[in-house]
Amino acid sequence: MGNFSQNLEKQLKLTGITKAELSRMSGISKSTIQQWDKKGAIPKADAALTISRILKTSVEALLTGETSFDPAEMYMKKDPELRSLVIKLGLHPELIPRVDAYLEGYMESHGYNLDADKKEGQSAG
């Protein structure tokens, strides 16, 4: 089960995001994140929600260490092509959210607009 600090650490490892990166991405100060470690504090609801979105997990997983859904399973069902790629590459399913987040960030940073590309493909058909 674990406490918030332990659960956060686990999710950070899964995504490959550091606490410094989490601070920058979330706008939550490094000192606040450190307080969660040192004092065993729990973040306010808005901070927990922001973190869960960045880490592509649930608030439930951050707070309790348990979850009623499996993010890897969700990604595998949502995108059959991604599922096929993960199987071909022999990746562990838990890495899917991390790979998806990386690819999304890469595409955005290189000027790709996936939503526009999807709409364009639909209108061409």
Image: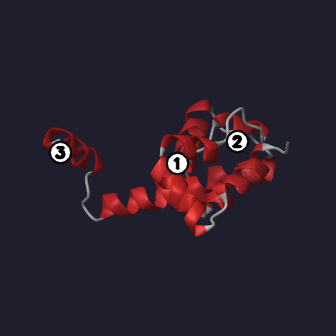
Residue 64 picture location, percent across and down: 78, 37
- Binning the other alpha carbons within 10 Å of mark 2 as few (below 14), some (14 to 19) or many (20 upward) gives many
Give the secondary structure at mark 3: helix
* Quarter of the rendering containing residue 91: bottom right
Image location (x, y in percent) of residue 98: 56, 58
Q: Looking at numbered disc 1 in the image, what kind of residue is underneath it?
A: Ile
Q: Residues within 10 Å of mark 1 (few under 14, many from 20)?
A: some
**Mark 1 touches mark 2? (CB < 8 Å):** no
Q: Quadrant of residue 44?
A: top right
Is 58 rendered above or below residue 117?
above
Of tags 1 and 3, the one toward the viewer is 3
The answer to whether residue 60 is left or right of residue 111 is right
Label located before the other in sequence (1 or 3): 1
- Return the x and y of residue 102 as percentages of the image width and height: 47, 61
From the viewer's side, name the closer residue of 12 and 44: 12
Instruction: Indicate the quadrant containing the C terminus: top left, top right, bottom left or bottom right.
Output: top left
Q: Secondary structure at mark 2?
A: helix
Q: Position of residue 33 (x, y in %)?
A: 65, 52
Taking 22 as reference, is 125 above or below it? above
**Looking at the figure, which quarter contains the N terminus?**
top right
- Cα–Cα gap, marks 1 and 2: 12 Å
Q: Which residue is mark 2?
A: 62
| Residue that badge 3 annotates | 120
